[in-house]
Amino acid sequence: MLARELKKGSAELIILASVEVRARHGYEISKLIEAQSGGEIKFHVASLYPLLYRLEERGWLKGRWVEKAGQRRRRFYSLTAEGHHVLARQRETWQRFVRAVASLTGVSHA
Amino acid sequence: MPDWTSEIESRLASLRLTAGREAEIVEELSQHLEQRYAELRDQGVAEAEALALVREELLGDESIAERMRPLRQANVSPVVAAGAPRRELLADFWQDLRLAARMLRKQSGLTLMVVLTLAIGVGANGALFALVDRVLLRDLPLPEPDRLVTIWERTETTPQSLASPLNMLDWERRSQSFDAIGGHLTGVFAMVLTTPQGAEAVMRQWVTAGIFDALGVKPVIGRTFFAADDTERKQSVVLSESYWRARFAADPGIVGQSLRLDGDLYAVVGVVPDQAEILGRANLWGLNFIRAAPERVRGQYPFRTVARLKPGVSLEAAQAEMEGIAADLAREYPATNEGRSVVLQPLRDAVLGTELKRTSVLFLGIVGFVLLICFANIANLLLTRNSARGNELAIRSVLGADRRRLKRQFATENLLLAGLGGVAGLALAGALLAIAPAAIPQDLLPSGVEIGFDWRVAAFCIVATLAVALLFTLASSAQVAELTALREGVPSGRRMTDRSSRTREALVVGQVATAVVLLYGAGLLTRTLITVDSVDPGYRAPSVLSLFVDPLSDSYPTPEALLQFYGAIEEELKANPGVASTAWTTTLPLGPSFAGKLFYDVDGEPAFVPAERPTAEMQIVSTGFFSTLDLPILAGRAFDDGDRPGAMPVCIVNEAFVERRLRGVEAVGRTVQTWQAEDSSQPPRTCEVVGVAANAKRRADEPEAPSQIYYPFARLPDDDIYLIVRPVAGDAGALASSVRAAIARVDRESLVSVTDIATLESVARDATARYRFRALLIGAFAGIALLLAALGVFGVLAYTVQRRWREYGVRMALGARRAAVVRLIARDAARLLIPGVLVGGLLAVVAGQLLGAMLFGVRPFDAPTFTLVLVVLAATAAASVIGPAFRATRIDPVGALRSD
């Protein structure tokens, strides 16, 4: 597991990126993050949902209840237009930060 | 499958989410947990271990409630218990605001009254503030106005006299204190601009070369005058920007072109911004040559001056230097400058004369009074409303609303009310200022000083509004404290302590006092207006038309040609059957004059030294003047056709001249010598008095008729002259177009400008415009004050009746007659009115003294006016007592006793 601070700083970026391609529900998001990070990053229910609600309140995510025939309804989260902007900006910032840390510490970019 | 619902619910409980939102979150989270559990079980994890792992999901580093607390959705206010103690300011404010809006809608009558009162108070005062601001508070609209001064010449008899051109030049050459000194003639007169399309009148003012540098006015295009233009005697003009835009469509090519003005060519050297109109309302300024003037001109004093002090030079230092220079000049030119000194005055004070300042201070006083009365009235309305809400407050405070919260609720309501009133007031101020230019007398404001709606007026309105909100909030806070203190007892408006009532009564007394002061002031100014309006102008003609006729300077080069032209016009008019008689004059009764004052001596009377010679008003009039105006000739004869060049020089004097100078002794046959100027370097004009005319008023407010000397027009033809026309019957105004047509028939080449067409009645009305304006203004405000005071008295009485409902009922049950109850109410009314009248009366006496300078024909303490004020007040008071008294006499004793 990565250090708590690192995760905290990048949590918003990670969540936003996870729904960039299409809308997903909470469980799907947590699974996706865990799988893609090779189990390095996990979000608990207690941290994932408050974060989703916060991003929703900021207008970066939009949550919608979707009902499919024969299934229970689920809440899907998708990026808003503003969310797309924020994601692009945060991604760039993060890249600059990583490059800077790399050149300072001699850790090469993987 | 385990159920997580209750587990999640308990963790969210502390957040006070709305029920709907909480259900959604519980649904979403439990789905997640169920799916996780199912997955773990699928992976073969034992049931107990899976349960523990899933529960761990809910724990995290911080609890879910902790993480959600900053979110808005976790901050939904409870629906009930408005006024419960809370900490969230903004949410509370929003809630307060909605509640306030609801309250105000519910009491729409009261809301409307408060908003209207406030709108009148703020709006009317905002508009007046614009004037006061312009006149008393703000600098002239010129660069670095603090450095601008006027240099007056000073003699023993005249503390501020106009300047001689040669003295001005010497001041300029010898002093070190000024960047520039310029002069201008005070009059603005029409010139005829001839273009290929025809002739038109333009307003021209003569200035000297330095004037625009002194004002600090930079040309929009071209340049202003150079000293070289003066020395080389280049006939040149500078246009005002608005004239340039309106007449020449802002064509920059105008610079360098020549305009034909009164027949002569003038080169346009530049265009200056309209700020220069501070000198006079002119379309263009012509260069007055002074640099090559002969020495005798030193004895002429036509110029008003504007001088710009060098940076850092104080008025006192400049004054000291100039006194030295004036003393030198007095030694060098004793004939003209003996006894002459100079005095410097800030230009602002010189431009905004005492008359205007006086009016503005009056306005400022009214502003204050009316604002006070408005405040008092609104405060009263709100206090009444608040006490009516005693029950509501008591209930809310019992339900747990804390006092601070209730006070804030009131503050919000007051703010909302004040805001509505303020917005309406701003709109009213804007509307008033939009129509103000048409309503205020033209000569009240100096040219170049315009009033209008600007950010300073808006700021005034906003500050006044906020002050109202603050004041009411303080008042209602005190009341909330009082009302909530009663919560232990049975909540009832009847149990109000007396403190609020006393405050309200004091406010009403204040209103009555203010109304008395304003009514008295309005009365005095109205009586002044009536006096000046009903002043006997001296002439008896019921209706006379006047026109200003200004021929081009070179179109009638000789006096003979000019007289012939004037004669032709009179001939033409005689053919008009509607015209009874016509005449020419330099002076209109109660109107302007193109002839100045004369210094005179009468042969056979003790002679005066030149500096102490008496003065008389000079008028040049044609033979028909006295008959056209029907101005009686009391002795001797009027002018006739024999009074022409070559014949014996004659003049006519007026009654006041005879009384003052000849102690009523027969004047006809005496010889009078007159001088145009104070110095007697020029030979006097001698004439024999052939008649004595009745006094014709020159100004409506002159305390005594001035001495007047009339000269026959045929001997001194002037080309700045009024034509007066008297109709056979009816209104002279109806003749205007036919008279114009007659002039046009004579003046085929359009060489004459005809302006200022007006009847003498309207000239007289214009002369008293400022009195009318003042009386109207203070009268309007006094009316508002009276209405507000009446409402105040009514409000208090109505409230008293309501409060003492049961008492009246008991009295009537015990046998009191209706008359007795009415007497009780009348006594309450008297308790408000008598102190109000006493206080107001005292203040009115003071106010009357302050108004002294604006009064004419009425003394500051005027018993009839005061009596009238009392009568008006008594009638108003009676009107406001009737309603409550009627209500009190309709009380059903049984019902009143049963009611709580």
Image: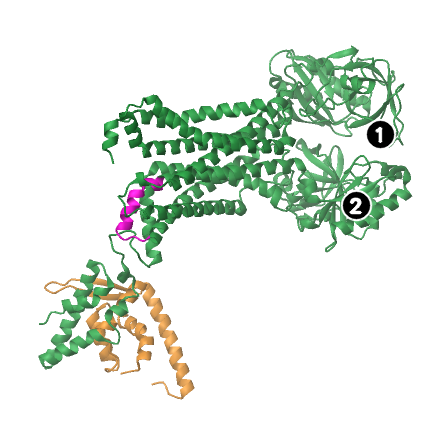
Chain colours: A orange, B green
Lower position in the chain sequence, tag 1 or tag 2: 2
Against B124, is B818 above or below? above
Label annotation for residue B309: none
Tell me the subunit letter for badge 1: B
Q: Is residue B313 left or right of residue A109?
A: right
- Identity of the amino acid at label 2? Asp
- Residue B365 appears at what percent x and percent y? 56, 38
User: For residue B867, what is the image quadrant?
Assistant: top right
Q: Main secondary structure of the magenta part?
A: helix
Q: Nearer the viewer, residue B872 or B693?
A: B872
User: Which residue is tagged 2?
Assistant: B229
Can you give x and y, in whole percent of width and height, for residue B293 in the image?
Answer: 85, 40
Q: Position of residue B765 (x, y in %)?
A: 62, 24
Relative image position of residue B375 (x, y in whole percent): 46, 40
**Residue kind at label 1, given as amino acid type:** Glu
What is the residue that sits farthest to the bottom in this orientation?
A106
Tell me what residue is drawn at x 36 percent, y 72 percent.
Answer: A90
Q: Which mark is residue B612?
A: 1
Front tag of 1 and 2:
1
Q: Depth check: B867 or B117 in front? A: B867
Left or right relative to B655: residue B94: left
Q: Quadrant of residue B747?
A: top right
